[in-house]
Amino acid sequence: MDKLSGVIKKADIVLFAALILLGAALSVPALMWRDSGDTVRVTVNGKLFGTYKVSEDREVAVKKNGNTNIVLIKDGRVRMESASCKNQICVHTGKISRAGQSIVCLPNRVSVTIEGEGGGQYDAVSGK
């Protein structure tokens, strides 16, 4: 233990903690100021199935290749209500509401993405 305490000093621990806090502080604005989206884009196998307004409550039945996914748009949020896939990961993803967020059902090849002005395209590194 004496050998280890000679290598790691209190100043190293303080520096490490400060770097962790700085990283967390720089991440908060990027997460808080993301645009809320205005359009829901649904694709199947990479092809556009439809676009819908986030502000209009509706249920979208995506039926392709013998598979069915139900997308629910309600109160400015989007979720996968049900899916005919076995793993149900897309259903358990929960609700999304911000531009750039998505729900993907890999077995059925269905993707639901929220888009909007700015669409989560802010680059935290370059600031553009």
Image (cartoon, rainbow, N blue to C red):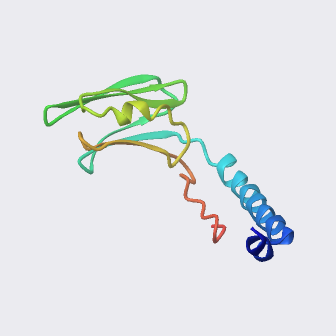
Image position, residue 16 (x, y; %): 76, 66
Quarter of the figure with residue 69: top left
Q: Residue at 25% across / 44% down in the picture?
A: 109
Q: Nearer the viewer, residue 19 or 48?
A: 19
| Front in this rendered view, residue 20 or 45 | 20
Query: Would you say 35 lies left or right of 61 here?
Result: right
Quarter holding the C terminus is bottom right
The answer to whether 36 is drawn above or below residue 61 in the figure is: below
What residue lies at 44% left-to-right and 44% top-to-bottom?
102
Judged left or right of residue 19, residue 88 is left
Q: Quadrant of residue 20?
A: bottom right
Q: Residue furthest left?
A: 66
Q: Quadrant location of the N terminus?
A: bottom right
Front residue of this view, candidates 96 and 121: 96
90 to the left or right of 86: right
Q: Residue furthest front?
A: 2
For the point 68% across and 49% down, which residue is it? 33
